[in-house]
Image (cartoon, helix red, strand yellow):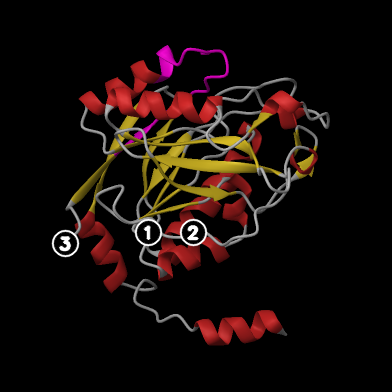
Amino acid sequence: MNAPTLRVALVTEVFHDDPEGGRLTELLRAAAAEGADVAVLPELPLNPWSPASKEAQDEDAEPPGGPRHRLQAQAAGAAKVALLGGAIVRDPASGKRFNTALLFTPDGRLAAHYRKIHLPEEEGYWETSHYVPGASPPEVVQGVLPWPVGMQICSDVNRPEGFQLLAAGGADVVLAPRATPPETYARWRLILRAEAIMSATYVISVNRPRPELGASIGGPSVAIDPFGEVLLETAEPLALVTLERARLEEARRAYPGYLARFPSVYREGWDR
């Protein structure tokens, strides 16, 4: 039986100027001291926001298990808390680069990863110049957190298919790191609330905290319940929220949570 609660730490901070990982480890230890089951970082938390320009640098990316990966793994292990972080990971076989969410266990082991699919290409967000879309659908991760969890990254939430796949697969919470401008926050808030309602899951979305390299970035991180109610909006480096299983079960008994899904019908529509 899944645990009655899940305690989540929203870490609204980036760490590209923290080469030894001391500040990251300190925040994770503070989260663990407050009972966090998992800490969630923003999109590409150990990278400067390189998509601010079209020019991609070799050092922006790393092989699987590279230095940013290792630093996050060490911080999670030192704090003894699960961690959702990320990096630009270069595939060894193809050489292609992917914006990759990395989910670590409390002992610092990589348990799962997810490659961002939907990539913007506009001022301040020249992402297709830096990495390519992932080609695998998101999967529900069991056994790392007390609840089944799914991952999305930023612009993925503007296409609802990922949330629907995760909900159908049994996810109770979707973690969605992002890097978004403050002037569009009202729209992001609306979309994230709608995704929570339609999928009957909790949604946690942690934003990068400030403008970088000329790109407008900032606005709150947010935790949303499966009825679309905002539980927490924060721009603080560390904030915690407790998710309640009873609320999740209530949403799945109510409309629209109880509605059946028809994958064969959806598949036919997409095939057409």
* 112 with respect to 182 (left or right): left
Q: Where is 242 relative to 257, above or below?
A: above
Is label 2 or label 3 in front? 3
Say the numbered circle drawn on residue 195.
Answer: 2
Res 259 → quadrant: bottom left
Residue 227: x, y in percent?
36, 59
252 or 130: nearer the eye? 130
* Amino acid marked by disc 3: Met
Which residue matches tag 3? 1
Residue 134: x, y in percent?
65, 53
Residue 108: x, y in percent?
36, 33
Say the numbered circle drawn on residue 201.
Answer: 1
Q: Residue at x 65, y 59 (%)?
A: 135
* Amino acid marked by disc 2: Glu
Residue 254 in sight in this render: yes
Label 3 sits on a secondary structure element that is loop
Between the C-alphas of marks 2 and 3, the distance is 25 Å
Residue 216 in sight in this render: no
* Amino acid marked by disc 1: Thr
Write down the region rendered in magenta: 8-24
